[in-house]
Amino acid sequence: MKHGTAYHIFPHLMLLLVPLIFLSTCGKSEFSPSTATQNDYVPGEKEYSTSTCSNFSLRKPLVDVVLLWSDTNHSNSYVSSYLKYSLTDLLNDVANYDYRVVAVPMTSASTSWSNAVIASYNGDKFLNNKTPKSINALANEVMAFNSGGYKEYGLKWLQFVANHTSDWHRSNAYTIYILVSFTDDEVQDRKNTAGMEVQTAATNFKTQLNNSQLYTAQTFFFSFIKTSNNSCWNYSGKATAYEDFSNQIPGKIMTDICSANRADFFYEISKTITDIVVPHRYRYWPISTTYGASINKDSIEVYIHADGGRTFVPPTRYTLKTNYNGDIVYQQDLNTRCYPSEGEPLSGYFIDFGKGTNTCDVNQTISYPNCITVKYTDRPVCYKFFPLASEPSASTIKVFKNGIQTGKYTYRQEWGFKLDQNVRVDCDNPTQPADVAEYKSGYFIEFDEPYTSGDNIKVTYQGTAKL
């Protein structure tokens, strides 16, 4: 019986021993957790570039016109309707601006403003407080000039007008002299002295232009005279004196009055008057107009485009529009233009070419037609905390920075699993959080020194084993 009992018990013992033997032969690694790997790459600083140009505005110019008109009997009697229409058109064109017109007949040997007819913008008085006429009334009166004489004293009048520039001329105005004659000046009657008298008159006229600083790109001298012996306007002679005088005036435009039988006779004069380009000046220039833009102050480069070239602007020429902490801050509706008036508001982040002052000096600010290119990169982003997805075994943690293993970190085991940890810090002061937070959750590693833009972080670890 005992033998039989032992025999039956043995198979049951074998069944119990098999799993024990199996367990004893299993290696330890069969129950070790697998190795986890986590990576974080911080993108390099992105480069930005913006190019914008300065602007301008157009302003109606001042226009001062002196009209020296022939009024001899055998001149004015033959003025065609075309010439009258053309003069009216010219004066109406002039009336679109801030104008002064002085018209004088050339038959009086005694030059005086009492013989002049004037018109002005808004009826403003000038010429010794003389009362102006309307532009149309002046045109009609000029056409009615007729003293009954046959002599002209145009050269005397030209010198008189030049000698009394301050009576009618305004600084920075277009200055237009218009000589219209159908005969010639009376000096031509004195054959022996005519040439010298013309030379003297031209010299005096040019001297007064110089003294009055009227030799500019905005000064014009038009002569509408007889430049040939062809018979027209009932006068067969050539205006030798007027032609010789005109040829001595720089920039003169001389037209044969015998071609006056057309409506666009004075068209060339109208074309000389153009709106004035007013260059704008800018104290502030945008770096970026994007709200929340990340701007690395140390990366800013400024270039000015002028005369077909590009020139680097040194940082000594400008400052940045910052707050009291020296941070570039977003400006709302900042007037970027300082001349001809404050304006052109813009929102964004700005360079200050005034360097913190209210200057609008043309040598300090940016002016039309110059363009500016501003380059910059993002501010570097710094991270001090690295989240692990699962709880690590502290002794298995390995940290690699840009491929090189480092031990400059601390595993914050005491935190356990932490929610919403701000992982970003201020690059200039790593003990302080960054202006823009970035929240992560997990088990955290804290770096001794932050990793930043362009860095590649790799962490390997084994999780804690829990049976």
Image (cartoon, helix red, strand yellow):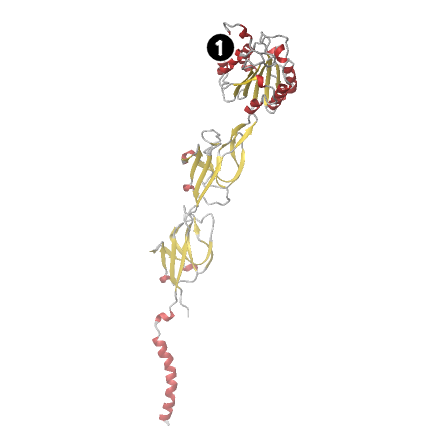
Q: Is residue 124 visible to us here?
A: no
In the image, farthest residue toward the bottom? 1
Quadrant including the C terminus: bottom left
Residue 334, position as x, y percentages in the image? 52, 37
Please state if 33 lies on the left or on the right of 165 as rendered: left
Residue 453, position as x, y percentages in the image? 40, 49
Please state if 54 lies on the left or on the right of 113 as rendered: left
Q: Is residue 139 visible to us here?
A: yes
- Against 43, residue 181 (above or below) is above
Assess disc 1: are there few (<14), some (14-19) or many (≥20) residues with their C-alpha within 10 Å of its C-alpha. Answer: some
Looking at the image, which residue is at 37% across and 68% down? 32
Number of labels in the image equals 1
Residue 401, position as x, y percentages in the image? 36, 54
Mark 1 = which residue? 199
Pick the front one: 356 or 82? 82
Quadrant including the N terminus: bottom left
Give SS at disc 1.
helix
- Quadrant hosting residue 184: top right
Pick the front one: 38 or 4? 38
